């Protein structure tokens, strides 16, 4: 009889213990089960509302499977230049290091009014080497320069002076010259897990690039590199989201590490032209190259008003 | 009886579930772990010791001043020991005071290689309260005066711009007696007389006696490139590596590490947080950062301090070491932008064993003083010190070794160069940083 009592007591106490353990177990599970990413995207929606920032772009697309890539600069060959020169509408040359191609139109190429990206692409493509590798990047009104970005692995290399087509537009909306740089073959570098576009927007918010009433109008992805000072040698490009705000300013957010950069095209172009292209052109001009000479004066005129900003 | 069997069964089930639940709770954490970044690999370190402000902020001169005469220890080890004592002395009654020069019969001047915010001294001296709240109060030295009447010591800090001063008191007769006995023994062998230069950027004391010192040949080790790479890049598998000659270049989209000439230079152009004010001083950030990868591989001391950059210099036998090669092998330099390390340049050698020594007679101090005084830019000279010139040389077998040779050095624009030889028409423009 006594044993039966003890058993009842045991059953009761174990019932209580189990109840407590079950409660602990479930609350533990709840606490840990909330994935961190979910909270941050919930926070993001809330934060964006607080800051009065709207998203009109499609941000729910699948996270791209891009790896880091590395690539060195392509050197243009003599035969490529002579192929271009077969086209009687242009004259082409290359810099002594074969990395910069310059071309002048024998009669300036008129850009139709209200030209969109496609019109522009088809307008210039007959005059360009590997034109299918390039896609429209930006049209800077201050400098009146149109840039196309080279595509690698199907995605654009954003704002990189080693992978860019640059069209110099005059006041009559005509292209007088263009320059071209290209990257060679790419090697895949590493394959990190990439963040979602929403996380990229949240990094942008944390970096205080977004202001009240901003509207995120476009999100796309490609490759971007911040270190470009090396003339030769390899550059590494990170999978990067390009986030357009209010249809006018672009920001680049590294898709793996969430570092953020404002894409100030004008500053970049002025720096690129003043620091790099002009130097190469001057080398060519020293050889009594009249095309280089005329392009130098075109570029000098364009960047003159903004040079002091660089200091 | 049937009821009893049912109860036993129930009890067993209850015990079983409680065991399962307990076990489940213990093990739940294990599933959580893999969420951590599996791409990061074991952190490498450079094998140095952990250092705090105390270990890197040290004076490079301690001068005893009495009746217009100046003395210092002949052996800088003694100066270092004295400063260690002073660090334990209790300073109280700290308060601002007027900047008028206070004279005393006997005074000790403790001089540091570079100006630092006065608040830094709170960490390295034994003070009972904050020294100043002014972030722009920089000092490069302080003074301890003996007050005979009260048998106590007065401490003075005067800002570099001369606008502010702070005084404190050391109420210890033991400390007083210790300093007093030094002053009464200044004629002893362990002390030497100094000459004071005042036309220079700051007061400089130069020991008068001629000196013969040792040159040292060291075997040395260089830290491996893979170790440095793993420290500087959080995800080494994303790094591209290229080699040209002896130099290695590691690069990602925003970071670049050049491993060359026994040193490294790293830049990071990533921008994480715009305009985030740093809570910690750049000095504190750099200490923590270097300690994180055990980067103080030798006796490195604070050599230069600016709003956004810090330089540490190698010291050997209490003397500064100077190297003027393209990769400065005697310094660690860090530049910070808000809370982000943007530049990091450093020596990767660590001196191993002394292979050989030889004696070297240093130039006469009279000659040094007259050279300094004839320098047109004397007002720019911040310091004159005996230092070791570090060079990497090759012996007959092609083995590399490090040579440390003592010489007189002057500091201009925070950069050390050999005091030019007399009667050479052109100035020696060898420059280091």
Image (tube, rainbow, N blue to C red):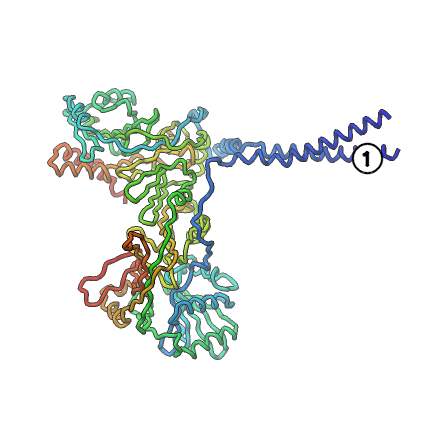
Q: Position of residue B256 (x, y in %)?
A: 35, 41
Left or right relative to A236: residue B153: right
User: Image point 76% across, 32% down: which residue?
Assistant: A15
Residue that carries the numbered disc 1 in the rendered image: A9
User: Image point 46% across, 55% down: which residue?
Assistant: B51
Q: Quadrant where the C terminus of chain B lies?
A: bottom left
User: Image point 19% across, 65% down: which residue?
Assistant: B424
What count of labels does the image hold? 1
Q: Residues within 10 Å of mark 1 (few under 14, many from 20)?
A: few
Q: Quadrant where the N terminus of chain B lies?
A: top right
Left or right relative to B59: residue A301: left
Residue ranking furthest to the left: A288
Q: Front-most of B408 and B281?
A: B408
Seen in the picture, residue A90 relative to A206 is either above or below; the reply is above
Any part of residue B119 in sight: no
Q: Front-most of B352 and A178?
A: B352
Q: Position of residue A163 (x, y in %)?
A: 28, 31
Q: Front-most of B61 and A246?
A: B61
Seen in the picture, residue B347 relative to A6 is either above or below; the reply is below
Left or right relative to B235: residue B380: left
Label 1 sits on a secondary structure element that is helix
Q: Position of residue A178 (x, y in %)?
A: 21, 29
Q: Front-most of A242 and B9?
A: B9
Residue B187 is drawn in which quadrant?
bottom left
Chain containing mark 1: A
Residue B366 is drawn in which quadrant?
bottom left
Residue ranking furthest to the right: A1
User: Image point 38% across, 46% down: which residue?
Assistant: B224
Any part of residue A259 in sight: yes
């Amino acid at each position: 009889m006594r044993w039966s009592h003890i058993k009842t007591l045991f059953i009761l106490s174990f019932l209580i213990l189990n109840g407590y353990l079950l409660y602990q177990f479930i609350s533990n599970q709840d606490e840990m089960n909330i994935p961190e990413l979910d909270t941050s995207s919930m926070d993001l929606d809330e934060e964006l509302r607080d800051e009065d920032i709207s998203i009109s772009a499609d941000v729910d697309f699948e996270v791209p499977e891009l790896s880091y890539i590395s690539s060195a600069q392509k050197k243009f060959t003599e035969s490529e230049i002579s192929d271009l020169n077969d086209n009687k509408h242009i004259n082409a040359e290359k810099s002594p290091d074969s990395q910069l191609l310059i071309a002048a139109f024998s009669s300036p190429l008129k850009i139709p009014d209200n030209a969109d990206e496609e019109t522009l692409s088809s307008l210039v493509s007959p005059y360009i080497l590997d034109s299918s590798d390039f896609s429209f990047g930006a049209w800077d009104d201050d400098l009146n320069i149109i840039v196309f970005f080279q595509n690698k692995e199907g995605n654009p290399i954003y704002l990189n002076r080693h992978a860019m087509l640059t069209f110099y537009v005059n006041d009559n909306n005509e292209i007088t010259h263009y320059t071209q740089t290209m990257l060679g073959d790419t090697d895949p570098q590493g394959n990190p897990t990439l963040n979602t576009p929403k996380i990229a927007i949240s990094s942008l918010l944390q970096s205080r690039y977004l202001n009240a009433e901003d509207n995120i109008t476009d999100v796309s992805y490609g490759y971007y590199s911040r270190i470009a000072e090396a003339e030769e040698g390899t550059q590494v490009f990170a999978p990067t989201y390009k986030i357009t705000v209010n249809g006018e300013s672009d920001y680049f957010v590294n898709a793996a590490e969430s570092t953020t950069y404002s894409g100030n095209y004008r500053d970049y172009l002025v720096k690129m032209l003043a620091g790099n292209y002009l130097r190469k052109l001057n080398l060519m001009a020293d050889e009594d190259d009249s095309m280089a000479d005329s392009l130098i004066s075109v570029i000098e005129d364009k960047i003159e008003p903004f040079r002091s900003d660089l200091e | 009886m049937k009821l009893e069997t049912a109860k036993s069964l129930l009890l067993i089930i209850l015990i079983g579930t409680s065991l399962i639940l307990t076990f489940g709770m213990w093990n739940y954490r294990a599933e959580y772990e893999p969420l951590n970044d599996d791409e990061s690999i074991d952190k490498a370190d450079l094998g140095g010791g952990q250092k705090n402000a105390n270990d890197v902020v040290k004076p490079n001169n301690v001068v005893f001043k009495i009746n217009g005469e100046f003395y210092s220890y002949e052996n800088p080890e003694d100066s270092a020991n004295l400063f260690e004592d002073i660090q334990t002395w209790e300073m109280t009654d700290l308060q601002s005071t007027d900047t008028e020069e206070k004279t005393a019969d006997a005074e000790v001047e403790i001089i540091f290689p570079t100006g630092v915010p006065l608040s830094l001294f709170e960490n390295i001296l034994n003070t009972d309260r904050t020294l100043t709240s002014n972030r722009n109060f920089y000092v490069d030295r302080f003074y301890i005066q003996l007050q005979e009447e009260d048998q106590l010591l007065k401490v003075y800090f005067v800002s570099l711009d001369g606008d502010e001063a702070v005084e404190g008191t050391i109420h210890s007769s033991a400390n007083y007696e210790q300093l007093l006995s030094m002053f009464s023994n200044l004629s002893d062998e362990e002390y030497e007389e100094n000459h004071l230069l005042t036309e220079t950027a700051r007061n400089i004391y130069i020991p008068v006696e001629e000196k013969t010192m040792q040159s040292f040949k060291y075997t040395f080790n260089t830290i491996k490139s893979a170790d440095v790479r793993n420290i500087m890049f959080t995800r080494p598998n994303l790094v591209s590596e290229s080699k040209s000659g002896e130099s290695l270049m590691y690069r990602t989209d925003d970071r670049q590490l050049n491993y060359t000439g026994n040193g490294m230079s790293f830049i990071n152009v990533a921008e994480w947080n715009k305009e985030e004010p740093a809570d910690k001083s750049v000095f504190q950030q750099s200490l923590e950062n270097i300690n994180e990868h055990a980067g103080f591989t030798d006796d490195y001391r604070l050599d230069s301090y600016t709003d956004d950059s810090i330089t540490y210099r190698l010291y050997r036998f209490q003397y500064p070491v100077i190297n003027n090669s393209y990769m400065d092998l005697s310094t660690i330099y860090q530049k910070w932008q808000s809370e982000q390390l943007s530049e990091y340049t450093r020596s990767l050698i660590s001196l191993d064993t002394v292979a050989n020594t030889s004696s070297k007679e240093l130039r006469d101090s009279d000659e040094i003083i007259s050279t300094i005084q004839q320098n047109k830019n004397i007002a720019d000279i911040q310091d004159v010190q005996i230092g070791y010139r570090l060079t990497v040389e090759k012996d007959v077998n092609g083995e590399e070794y490090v040579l440390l040779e003592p010489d007189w050095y002057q500091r201009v624009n925070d950069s050390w160069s050999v005091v030019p030889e007399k009667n050479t028409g052109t100035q020696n423009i060898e420059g280091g940083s």
